Amino acid sequence: MSASLSRLSSRSVSQAHTSIHKASLASPRLHPCFSLNRTFIQRVMSTTKDVSSQSDIAKMAKEKDGSFKRKDSQFRSTIEKGGKFAPEKGRYHLYVSYACPWATRTLIVRKLKGLEEIIPVTVVSPHMGEHGWPFAKADAYPGTDADPLYDSEHVKDLYLRVAPNYDGRFTVPVLFDRKTETIVNNESSEIIRIFNTAFNDLAHRAEIDSINAWVYDTVNNGVYKSGFATTQTAYEAAVRPLFESLDRLEKILAGKDYLCNLRTIRGGYPALHLWMRKLYWNDPAFSTTCNFDHIKTHYYWSHPTVRQPTRIVPVGPVPDIEPL
């Protein structure tokens, strides 16, 4: 049966659904075998729709000038008392990758806010191939989880389940609502804000917003714009603002002025390096949510603009984080 279903076109599925829906209205006692619900329709359509341009990193569209432009996230709802999505224990589920820094920061805030018993989490494999981020069912990489809600093979299956016509990339993190069976939000900066505001007042909101305005574009996204650039001009246009912002952060933390220079965090930014090590070694919210094996494996295995053709994952640095 599964083989024949996979050959159904979206049009034939739609026609079948319409016919059976009309028949069910005319005959309320229609046998359950002929009931075709929305989940079934979406599952069949997801097998016939070509979404490789959305899931395969090798087919990721580049701008004409060779630069990397990140599209805005499309699921932008929030969790709030009295709203469509109310804060409830066990209602929401977080999907992440240890290899994705956008997802990792949601893990950190989840840990800092003590939401582990309120919002369960599922980790995908770092092997992001032609179908995007896989669950353990498709790639049982160590530390990878199965999808506990739908036994999906890939993150894309979640997106297509709730939005069959979704035209964006199948990214993590994903904050999913089990009650309405939909995605609440897939924008990391908003998810971490949700984790704060849904359960507690957000401290230092104005300061955080002012810094996030330039850190997000030049640092968080700056490493992607630099790493995924395919021309020298696009690379330099991204990498210089990246290090200028690192200098700016160094000044904020240390109260010192630095000339812009391209250098490592360990060797060139002592205040940033100390701050990072204190977070990692003194707070389990950082050390327990950081998996260096997943991080390195993902970037040297999945990304054709970063990895070598041999997909060799380098050893080191040792240690991953230097001691205090």
Image (cartoon, grey):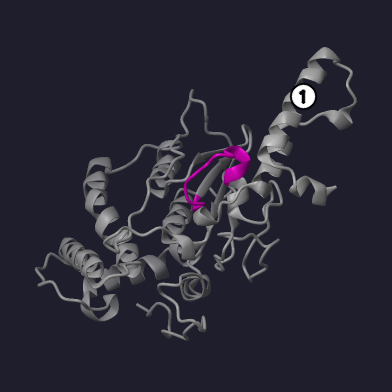
| Magenta stretch, main secondary structure class | loop
Kindly tell me whether residue 91 is visible in this rendering: no
Nearer to me, 112 or 227: 227
What residue appears at the point 46 percent right and 56 percent down from the top-left corner?
Answer: 103
Return the x and y of residue 51 as percentages of the image width and height.
56, 51
Specify the amino acid type for callout 1: Ser
The residue positioned farthest toward the top in the image shown: 26
> Which residue has dot 1 on it?
19
Which of the 4 image quadrants contains residue 126?
bottom right
Kindly tell me whether residue 94 is visible in this rendering: yes
What residue appears at the point 55 percent right and 39 percent down from the top-left corner?
Answer: 165
What residue appears at the point 68 percent right and 57 percent down from the top-left corner?
Answer: 146
Q: Which portion, as a residue range, is magenta?
A: 159-173
Magenta-span inclusion, residue 169: yes
Compared with 7, 180 (above or below) is above
Nearer to me, 8 or 129: 8
Return the x and y of residue 229 as percentages of the image width and height.
31, 67
Return the x and y of residue 323 as percentages of the image width and height.
38, 79
Magenta-span inclusion, residue 122: no
What residue appears at the point 46 percent right and 84 percent down from the top-left corner?
Answer: 314
Q: How many numbered callouts? A: 1
Is 85 situated left or right of 241 in this image?
right
Is 287 situated left or right of 241 in this image?
right
Return the x and y of residue 223 as percentages of the image width and height.
32, 65
Bin the neighbour count of mark 1 within 10 Å (Cα to Cα): few under 14, some 14-19, many 20 and up.
Answer: few
Compared with 17, 45 (above or below) is below
Q: Secondary structure at mark 1?
A: helix
Q: In what quadrant of the picture does the C terminus appear?
A: bottom left
Nearer to me, 220 or 49: 49
